[in-house]
Each structure stands twice: as structure tokens, then as C-alpha cells.
Amino acid sequence: MTVVTRIAPSPTGDPHVGTAYVGLFNYAYARRHGGRFVLRIEDTDRERYQADAETHILEMFAWLGIAPDESPLAGGPNGPYKQSERLEIYQAHIDQLLNAGVAYRAFETEEELEAMRKEQKQRGLKLGYDGRGRTLPKEEQDARANNGEPHVIRLATPDEGETAFDDLLRGQIAIGNDEIRDPVLIKSDGYPTYHFANVVDDHLMGVTHVMRAEEWVTSTPIHVLLYQAFGWTLPTFAHLPLLRNPDKSKISKRKLDTSVASYREQGILPEALLNFLATMGWSMPDGREVFTLDEMVDAFDPARISLGGPVFDLKKLRHLNGVYLRDVLDLEEVARRVTPLFEQAGYPQDDPEYLLDVVDVLRPRAETLNDFVDQGGYFFVDTLDYTDDARKRIAGGQQVLEDLERELSMLDVFDEDAIDDVLEDYMRSRELKKPAVLMPLRAALTGTTNAPSVTDLIAILGRSRVLTRIGRALSDMTSSLPDDHPSDEDAAETEAKPKAKAKDPAQGPSA
Ligand code: GLU
């Protein structure tokens, strides 16, 4: 038997991390068993339908690297993979149930149903459809339908006994049949309900394993009754634990960012997000927390899924992303991924070697791809903007900067050892402490006081940029003073000066 799993999202909004999570587990199970992973768009709820959501769902799976084998995009032998394009199939299947007398057309109006509920309440009965339409003879049902009378089609379910199924993760789950009240299969707009379309499609698409979120557990007995009505074999059901907000409540937009696109925009890597989602309720046999998708697939066994609600911990996700940036992806790959981000932010890239050095030095402190751009823009500008703090450091270290400008310009070999020697000798000879020398230098070279090691900075920037930047910091200070030492003239001058990062053609891309 070929294992076939599926993800069946409804296109109702931004693709959700829960969809990525359930998709991942289905993908892993199918791959582990050499099977197929199907994506079906469940778009029968026309009120909640959003036109671009389907594209975003497909893009999300492609971005994550768990693209389905069959989908509206990939096609496949059991398409179409969009429920709104399968209406004829549902029609044929509902006819089958109508003819067999296990489904019936029910003509109650909204008012009648409301009156029924009211009476149930008054008499202290269980609320829900009471099956009153079941007794209408089939000929009459058909005649009224042919006359265009609005109606729904319901499944006639047993009143007594219970319906049970085996959940792969939870064991046997049974529900009293008095809880199942002739559910609607076809709505008055002619569209199938979730239950009906879902079961028909899972069967026709050859789905062997239905792995979905816990919230569908209570729908499953209805599905089981439908499988029985058709005389079809049940798939294996597995209901995965719901992701949780940090306060353990069910994951929700109000408390947490639940859109996969927003994590992508924040510079989270697809590999890290998958790894993180894999650890939600599942663990590697050896307890390893960092593993690739292929490693997960090789080891994937649903028996290792634990049902305690896994918490979507953002700190953990960011930390893991940092581990991927530093230790899992190689330098070239990280550089390849940050290149478009630098370019979008207005830092054109034309020197791959320089970018590699920049990425290498920023990597130890980066948790997201965006951190490279937020923390490293200064590598790619010709005119720095100085933070207030940087201005103060420069102003307080003018002598140091003048001295080092001279010393560094005289260096024969401009490498890390030589730079280190210059700095060490200088501090020793002037009896200066590290911060007194390194802080002004860092501020002059980057415009900030929060940057990597000064030796690294100098080595990467290269002689020409370093000397230009020190020179410019010094000249800037003579024309403006930091905010806490204002003089009227200087304040006026600072204000008049635009803060734009003008390009200086004299400064080449690499030193
Ligand atoms: N369309 C349902 C959803 O949006 C599918 C649930 C299922 O997997 O059966 O999650």
C-alpha cells in the first residue's frame, strides 16, 4: 500500500504556522514511507474565501521546501485539487447516498429550525436537528427540489449506540450517536460542507493517513459514518496536538504572530522554521534539537509525538535561526540569502568577497537575516550617519583618532596581526585603556557604538575606507558637536545638514 498523506487548507487568510506544522508532519510521514503528499484546497466556504490565499499557501510550501507531490500547481492523477472545481464529483456522490436512502433532502426554513431550538430549550432537550425531515418520502423530496424549493441535504445518522475510531496517537475515541444530529452534507447554496467534501476527496485521492490538528477530533465520527455510508475503508486518523501561545492557550493571532509570511519577512530561514516546528510535539530519538528536514524524514515515527500542547516559543525560534546562520548554513549560502535583503535596503552589492567578510564578522551575533542588514548597513555606505552616542565617542576621542589615522596610514601590511600590533602598541605607549581607544575608533568606522571587534572592522573595511572614515569623523566633529555640548552655531549647523547617505564616487567598493 502506498502511503498517501495530505494537507487540506482553507484559503481564508494568511497561511498559518499551524498549516506549515501539520503539513510538515504529513510530508515527513509520506517521505518516510516512500509515499505521496497531497495538497488540496478546501474552498467550499464561499463567505470566508480569499482569492489570493491559495497562491500564498502554495508559495509557503515551496518556500519551506516541503512542496506537495500533488496540488493545484503540481497537478496529479486525482485532480482537480481545488474543491470548488469538484462540484460534479460531490453531486454524483450525494446522489449515491440519496438513492441509498442514507441521505435526504430537508426543507425546513430558518424560522422552523429556530422554533425547533426554542422548543428543545423549553423542554430541556439536547439542542440540534431532530431528524424531522427523514420521513418525507423520496418522491416528495425530489418533487419539491425540482420545483426549486431551497433545501439542504443531510446524512441520516443512527440515534442510538456510538461511533468509534482508532486514533494513531490517542487510541480509541468514541462518541454517542445522540451527539451527531443528521449533519448537513450539501448546503442550500449547492456547495458541499467540509465534512462531505473532505471525506469524498480523501477517499478519491487515495489518502491512507489523515493527520490533522486536534480540533478536528470531534468531526471524525461524522466522517466515520460517511465512510460507512459509502462502504469505504477508513484511513488511519492521527490528531496532532495544537500549537499553543506562551500562556498555553490555543495559538491565536491576537497573542502571537501566526503568519508564516511574517516570519519570512523577519528573516527567519525556512530550514530553521521547519526544524522548530518539528520539535513541536515531536523529538529525535537521540534528543538532538538541531536537525535537517532529511534527518527528520529518516527518523520520523509518529509514536514519538507527544500530546502535551507544544508552545510556540519565539525566543527558541530566533535562537535556532541563529544556530542555522552560524553553524548549519555555510558562509556562501548565508551571503547568498542576505544579498537581496541588502539590495532592497539600498545597499547595492558588487563585491562578493567583501560581502563574505562582512557576513562572517556579523554572523556570531545575528539571529535573523534581517539582523545583517540592520547591523551591517554601515559596511556599504560612503557617508555614515552617526548615532548620538557615536558622536560623543568621536568628540571625546579626537586625539586618539588623529594619532591612529597617522599610524594606520603608515602600515605596510594591512592585516589583522599588524592592526592588532598598532592598537596594542598605541595603548601601551599612551597608557590608555581599551575603551578609550576602541570606542572612538568603532564610532568613527561604523557610526554606531554597537559593532563587532575593531580589529575585524579595520581588516574588513580596508585601508582606504578606514582612513576616509576616520578623516571624515574628525572633520565632522570640527563642524558639529554632540548634543550634550551644544553651542548655538553648531546646533544650527547640525540641523541644516541633511542626514542623507550620499554616495561618494571617490570611494571604491573594495579597499
Ligand atoms: N479545511 C480544513 C482546515 O482548514 C481541513 C481539516 C482537515 O485536515 O481535515 O484545516
Image (cartoon, grey):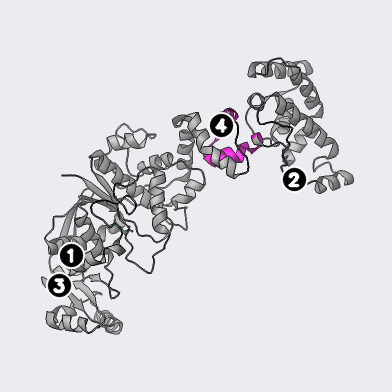
Q: Residue at x 22, y 64 (%)?
A: 89
Magenta stretch? Answer: 351-379
- Of label 4 and label 1, which has the lower sequence position? 1
Q: Is residue 93 above or below residue 439?
A: below
Distance from disc 4 to disc 1, alpha carbons, whole Å, reads: 61 Å
Q: Look at the numbered discs 3 and 4 and tell me whether their residues touch, using CB distance below 8 Å.
A: no
Please name whichever residue, 457 or 144, is drawn nearer the observer in this view of the structure: 144
Q: Image quadrant of residue 83?
A: bottom left
Name the spot of residue 397 as percent of width and height, x first. Answer: 78, 29
Q: Which residue is mark 2?
A: 499
Q: Which residue is mark 3?
A: 98
Q: Which residue is mark 1?
A: 176
Name the spot of residue 376 as percent of width and height, x first. Answer: 62, 36
- Of label 2 and label 4, which has the lower sequence position? 4
Foreground: disc 1 or disc 3: 3
| Secondary element at tag 4 | helix
Q: Look at the numbered discs 2 and 3 and tell me whether their residues touch, using CB distance below 8 Å.
A: no
Distance from disc 3 to disc 4, alpha carbons, whole Å, reads: 66 Å
Q: Which residue is mark 4?
A: 359
Residue 137 can be seen in this image: no
Q: Give amino acid for label 3.
A: Leu
Foreground: disc 4 or disc 1: 4
- Of label 2 and label 1, which has the lower sequence position? 1
Q: Residue at x 22, y 85 (%)?
A: 147
